[in-house]
Image: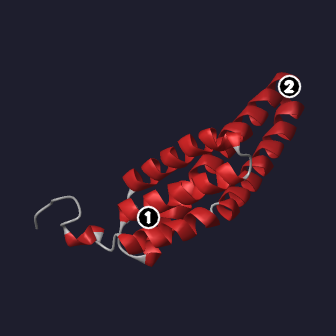
Amino acid sequence: MTDWRAVIIGFLVATVLSIVGLAIPGIGQFVAGLVGGFVAGYLAGGGLGRGFWHGLLAGAFGGIVVGVLLALLVALTGWAAGPIGGLLSGVAGIGILLAALLVSFILALESALAGAVGGLFNPRSQSSGRARGRRR
């Protein structure tokens, strides 16, 4: 099961570091993706696979959010041009959304690899019950 807390924290770490990383274009964003993915994988724990999954989600989350907002903006803007404009911009919005989703998951691979490493550093399993101090 996905630990959304780990995903959101990893996404926020990557977002803050990428804003700071604007001082070093390209490298700053690359490092931000690595650190955000590592944090998500470490917090999720559970080994390679679980860390990979959480790092992938944390890295792709920003692209997904931006893609959805951009697609909605394009789709809604077209409605000002009437029914034909709405239809055309709606189709364009769906295309933009699908392209943004694909690109965000491809670019999130670095975060996924860092998440796998983070998962190795924290091998605890969420299902063990000890993950957050819970008793069985």
Residue 45 quadrant: bottom left
- Whether residue 41 sits left or right of residue 97 in the image: it is left
Residue drawn at the location 64% of the way across and 44% of the way down: 21
Q: Amino acid at mark 2?
A: Gly
Q: Residue furthest top?
A: 80
Q: Position of residue 80 (x, y in %)?
A: 82, 22
Look at the image and tell me whether residue 15 can be seen: yes
Q: Position of residue 97 (x, y in %)?
A: 72, 49
Q: Nearer the viewer, mark 1 or mark 2?
A: 1
Q: Amino acid at mark 1?
A: Gly
Q: Position of residue 13 (x, y in %)?
A: 49, 47
Residue 16 quadrant: top right
Q: Which residue is mark 2?
A: 82
Q: Quadrant of the N terminus?
A: bottom left
Q: Position of residue 38 (x, y in %)?
A: 48, 62
Q: Quadrant of the C terminus?
A: bottom left
Q: Residue furthest left?
A: 135
Q: Which mark, residue 41?
A: 1
Q: Looking at the picture, tell me which residue is in the foreground, 125 or 93.
A: 125
Q: What's the CA distance linking mark 1 and mark 2? A: 47 Å
Vertical side of 87 occupied by 46: above or below: below
Q: Which mark, residue 33?
A: none
Considering the numbered disc 1 on the image, is that residue within a helix, a strand or a loop?
A: helix
Residue drawn at the location 83% of the way across and 37% of the way down: 89
Residue drawn at the location 56% of the way across and 45% of the way down: 17
Considering the numbered disc 2 on the image, is that residue within a helix, a strand or a loop?
A: helix
